[in-house]
Each structure stands twice: as C-alpha cells, then as structure tokens.
Amino acid sequence: MFHVPPSKVTPPPVPPEHIRRPGLEAALERGTDAALTLVCAPPGSGKTSLLAAWVASTRGPPTAWVRLEPEDTDPRRLWAAVLAALTALPGVPPSSRLHRLVVSRATVELDFVGELLEGLAALPDGVRLVLDDVQHLDRPAARHGLEMLVRGPPPGLRLVLSGRRDPPLPLPRLRLQERLREVRTEQLLFTRPEAAALLGRAGLRLTPPQVDALHERTGGWVAGLRLAAVSLRGHPDPDRFLAEFSGDERPVADYLVDEVLTGLAPEQRETLRRVSVARALPAGLAVELAGRDDAADVLDDLVRSTGLVTGTGAPGAEYRVAELLRSHLVADLGRHGPELVARTHRRAADWWSAQGRPVEALAHARWAGDAGFLADLLGRWAPRLVGVGELDALDRAAAALDADAGAEPWAGATVAHVHARQGRPTEVRAALRRARRAAPRGADALAFRTATERLVGLRGGTGACPEEADAAADPALAALVHLGRGTIGVVRDDGRAAVGELERGLGLAARHGLGALERQARCLLAAARWSVGDVAGAAVDAAAALDGVTGEEDTPWTAVARAVAAHVAVLRADPDAALGILAGATTAADAALPPALRFALRTAAGGALVDGADREAGLLALQAARAELGGVRAPAAVEITAALLEHDAASLLGHPAAGASVAGWLASRRPGCPELHLVRARTAAGAGDDHAMRHAVAPLLPGGLPPGPAPTLVEAWLLETRGRLARRDRPGARRALRTALDHALPLDARRPFVHAGDAVRALLVDQLVGGGDRAAFVARTLAARAGGAPAPSGLSSREHDVLTRLPSLESLDEIAEDLDVSINTIKSHVRAIYGKLGVSTRREAVLTAHEQGLLR
C-alpha cells in the first residue's frame, strides 16, 4: 500500500481573506442529481477556495477530498489516495468493504474500480468525492477508472472534479444527457463588488474609481487582483501603479509563465502571442494575425479546455484573451522587436477596415504608430463615424496624429465635430483654422471641412462648392454636405431652402443608418419648419429628435430641438410641458451655446412662466433674454415669437411702457414683418380704441398683405372677432372666430384663444355643438385657462349630469325629458349650478365649467 500523507486527503482550510460567493455555492449545490460536477478555469481563478468554502458550509454528505499531483497519473497512487480519503470518513463504517480493499503494488485492474463502486453503493449514506487539480490525470491508465466512476456511479456518490483544463472524459455526452453541471471561467471572475471586498480584506483602502480601474485591468481574475494587492501595499502613488499595471509586472509575469503558459502546447502559446494585440478577436482576424488557417480551432480548444480564452458568441464568432494574459503576451511580442508589434497592429487595422468596422480599425492604426497610415484611415472613415456619432473614436485618432498631420483638413474638421458636440465654440474655431492652414488632401477632405464649417455657422453660402461635386459617392459625406447647406439656410432665414436641403440630408442618413446625423437633421428641420410657420411639422421633428435623449446625451443640436418643442408647447397652451422640456436639457443654461440659441431657450421659458403661475417672473425673464441678446441677430421667427410673448405679457400685466419698449425693439429688428400690425392692434385693443385696432389689423386680413405665418393669422382673426363683437356684429364675429379656428386647428394653437378675452372665449362655447375636430379643439382650449383654474365648485352628481347637457342645443324641457325629471327640477339644478359657478348665463356656465375642468 502506498503511503498517502494526510494533507493530500484533507480539505484545505478556507483562507481568512476568502470572499463567500453564495451564488456559485448554490450552483454547486444544485448539481446533486448530476453524475459529475466540473469546475474548470485557469490557474488563480479561486476554484479550490470556492470548493473548500462550499464543503465547509453545506450540510451535504461527508466529503472525501483528494489533492492530485503529477505523480497521480500512476493509477496505483491515484486510487490509493482515493481509497485513503474515503476510508477516513466517519460516514464509512468499519464493516464497509472499502476498508478491506487494497491497491496492488503491481497494477490496478478494472476489477478494483468495480469493487470500489460496490463498496460505495453499500454505504448507508451518500458521499462526496472531490478530485482537485484533475488536469494531472493525463494518461489513459489513470483515466479509465475515472470513466467508470462517471459512467456508472452508485446512487450515493457525488463526483466533483476541479482543474485547469477539461479532463479527458465524455463531457459532450454527459451534457446531452443533462448529467453534467459546470462552473466555468466566466462564473468565477469576480464582480466589481466582490473585487472591492477582496481588496478591502487585503487591507487596501481604494477609492471607487481605483477599484473600477483594477477590476477592469484584471478582468475580475482573482489571482490578478491578489497580485495587484500585494504590489499596491505601501505604494506611494496608487493611481500611477493602476495606470501602469499590466501582465508584464514582474510578479504577474512570473505567475503567468510558471502557472499558465507552461501548461500550453507550443502552437497554443505562439497563436496567443500573435493574436494578443486584439482585445476583440473574430475568427477571421485570428487567422490573419496568427498566420495559420487553424487559428480558430486552436482558440476553440483553449476556450473549451482552459478558460484562458473566452468566446463571446457561437464557436468561431469572436474571442477574448484574459486581459492580464493578453497584456503580458503583447509585451512578450514587443521583445521580439517593436516593429513586429506595429506590423501586427497595422494588419489588424487593415482587416477591421475591410470589414467596415472603423472604430476598431482606427484604434489599431493608433497603436501601429504610423501617422500617415492613421491619417489615411481617418480620411476614409471620418464622415461615417460622424454620421453614427462615434466622435470619441475620431477624437482619439486625431489626437494621436503629430502636429503636422493633425493640422490637415480631415483631422482638424474631425476635432471640430467633437468640440461642437461638447458646445465649445472657441475650440471649434481653432480646429477649423488649423484645417484651413493645412495642405489640401483632395476634394473629399475639402468638402468635409466646408460642410463642418457650415454646420457650426462659420461659413456662409448655401450653394454647392466645387469640392462638393463628388461628395455623393460617400452617403455620409453627402448627408453632411446637405446638413451644412441647410444649417446656413436656417441661420440666414432662408427656411424653405433649408427645409429642402435638410430633408435630403435626413433621407440619406435614414437610409444608410447614420443615426447621429439623422437626429441632427431632425433638430435642424424643427427649426427650419418653425421659421416658415410649419408648426405641426416642427413639432413632429423636434419630438423625433428628442426621443430617447437623456440629459447626458444633450448637445447644442438637441438644444435647438428643445427650444422649438418648448415654443410649440407654449403655443399649444401647455406651459408645464414647455418647462418640462427645458428642464431636461443640461445645455440650456450653458453660456457656451450660441447667443441666438440661448435666447430661444430662455424666451420659451419666459413664455411658459407667463402662462403658468408667475406672469411677473415670465415678463422679467423675457426682458432679460432680450437684453442679453444685445446686438446679436437671431433668426426672424425667434425674434418675432419672443417679441410677441413679451408684448403679450406686458399687456396682461398692464405695463404699457414695457409693451412699447418691445414693440420698438421689434420694429428696429424686423421693420417689415406683419407682426408689427399685430402689436399695434393689440396696443389699440388694450387702450379700448376699437377703430385703431380695426385699422391696424386690416392689413393681415384678406386683401391686405401677403398671408403671414399661421399663428399670426389666428390672432389677427381673433382681434377681428373682438372688433365685431364690440360693434355688436355677432354673425360677423362668429364667422371671424370660425376662420381663426380653421387656421389654429392644424397647429393645435390654443394659446391665442386663452388670451383672447372673455367675450371671445364665451363665443367659443357655441362651437362645442355638433362634435367633430373643431368642437374637440374648442373643448381643449376652454380647459386651458391661463393662471390656473378656480377652486372646485362642489356640484352634486345630478347637477353635473345637467351641466354636461348645457353645451348642447337642447332646451331645458328636452333636458328634463332626457333625464326623466320635471322641468321645475331641471330649473332648480340650473339655478344651483349658476350659483356654485358664480355665473348668470348658460354660456358663462359652460365656459367656466370648461375652465375648471368640469367638462372635457
């Protein structure tokens, strides 16, 4: 009988710094119905500690533990150790035949294993058998007996194998039969909280960002975390250590060489070394970098047998080498000459570029250290990456170029896009100046620079430039060209031309999957449509542009959409929605935004305050926004809308001097705009001068000036309605009101009716009869009372039933018949309704009920 030292067959103690992993222990516990539980992962993954903690913490059957060593490939030593571990268990009674079994000094016959199985089957209770470091059983003689245990285990045996590689057993068959439970590398990697706990147990007090950095560097590999912890103790600069920590650190490198790489075949080591430059490794790239057609097969074998490589999809789809091992292999590759690393990175960049994956291509091109090669790739992919919003990749690529290459048109314009997204106009101008000083690199580069200059408002002209003639060959570049021209159209108040260019750019972006440009086009289209009075279209584009945008994703472009969406909400008498839209913008208060855009955002907020709970604050906000704008020109639609909001606020608050001030400002900025007639008509109406009001508004009605924007026409017809009511021309007033409604309905423009005065609003009640879109619009309009609704009226349920019939043309007799009560009862209910609502007529009752939200 071979001597078996007790340490070989005793479960190891759980290390004091061990981190309990209840989820993995539960997974091990669920394997009680399986023929085999396999724990397979690279060295240093915490396999032994996990099993030791599981064995110590569970109330399962007695556990026989065998720590295997290289000499256990001799089946005599193997089965002597297994037998010693089993017979030492208190659950194996002295009468068990296991005590009478003897391992032959000559050889181990299969009959011995059969007797062992019979002895296990006769035990009164079950038993767990853990074989740790099973990778040492690499000879057929040791394997045969183990296969017998796996194929025909007695009912009470729970077999657990742990090792660095898959044991040579029929694992696929066991998986198919659902008789195998596995714990693999991915499950053993520490999560970020587990890594933090481990480092804390090691006596380290790291900040959360430092823990994040170390967890990312190690990939959650336990040995890597422990090795880093040893080096970090007492280190004077933890941040510098973490920035430089890699697989080439001496303790880590020694461990990787001694414990990991020495167990691999030469072709496996060389393949890993060649592909190590790539963090993400598709099978095709592995073949390209390793220079061997079977590279994917080699990696697949490493995935299955070691866990040093993980697969991220179906076999052959994509691989990843453990991060610390990868960084060690890259350093080892560099010891064969830095030019070899550079050539390998360049091959990877070419491969990724051919696959249409520019982010990965540019990353490898940066690491290749060839500025000319990087600049060429940048030129090929910059429009596309701008189109999909991968500006960080472009920024890193441009930063990697030297001073001369970095000043050429592609790099300079690329950096300008990055700064534009961040709202940094000074840096945008500086980058484009560098691009202009550079030597030309072809028509595409010039077209890209020109489009960029237009997008940020630094170049005029909406017409085609000579360098843009061939831009259509690249859909992303063509879309940028159209967006650039459209932007200039918006800035220059040429809204119709802008809409056409932006629609063409939007179409290209949508067809070719350019999500960032699609959103940008929507933002600009919202502004362009607003400028030509297409409120409904502007609302649709602004909503599409802001769909799914969080505060962190806000850019100056989305600030444009927010400004439009907020002004639409104000026009639709929904101040709460307007303020909500503006509250979602992190850039709205950013001083780096263009002054005209800040003006648009702040005037929308002021208008919402006027219509909400604080008219005085709203007027002050509008006045402050105009003062801040100073002499800067904003688009006409923005200036006119802001002036009308401010003038309306001044009128509502009874501040004629404030109204005159903004009227003068508008006359000086937009001397020929139709809205000046509107301002004069409002002023006259406020002064009670009906004749002057009619004279002022007349040019806006048919036969006067060319038709103005729809919101202007709505208010003009409402003033005409007011004038006809003053002249007691009720039929004419109704006709004028219906015309105003016809202009307002497509826009859902309710605000002009909210501020039209009680007489006009009372006339709206008649439009509730008959149903349809107009009646629904009027109902929403009447409910949108500026300044909030009065207190609830306290109507009874029967009174409310009567109230709901008052907007109809039914007489009180008809209402009584419909409700099956007497006419006197209905009259009593009507008197009670009038008293509770504080009104004296049926029309006033309906109007007040809508304002209080009692009717919808």
Image (tube, helix red, strand yellow):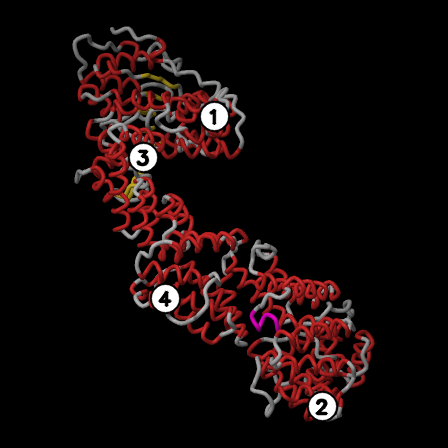
Q: Earlier in the sequence, mark 3 or mark 1?
A: 1
**Range covered by the magenta-colored residues:** 635-640
> Secondary structure under badge 1?
loop
Quadrant assignment, res 521: bottom left
**Dot 2 corresponds to which residue?**
724
Q: Which secondary structure dominates the residues rendered in magenta? A: helix
Q: Position of residue 165 (x, y in %)?
A: 27, 27
Q: Mark 3 or mark 1, which is nearer to you?
A: 3
Q: Earlier in the sequence, mark 2 or mark 4?
A: 4
Q: Earlier in the sequence, mark 3 or mark 4?
A: 3
Amino acid type of the residue tagged 4 in the rendering: Leu
Q: Earlier in the sequence, mark 2 or mark 3?
A: 3
> Secondary structure under badge 3?
strand
> Residue 19 got which mark?
1
Cα separation, mark 2 vs mark 3, equals 82 Å
Cα separation, mark 1 vs mark 2, equals 84 Å
How many numbered tags mark residues here? Answer: 4
**Dot 3 corresponds to which residue?**
321
> Residue 508 got which mark?
4
Amino acid type of the residue tagged 3 in the rendering: Val
Image quadrant occupied by the N terminus: top left
Amino acid type of the residue tagged 1 in the rendering: Ile
> Secondary structure under badge 4?
helix
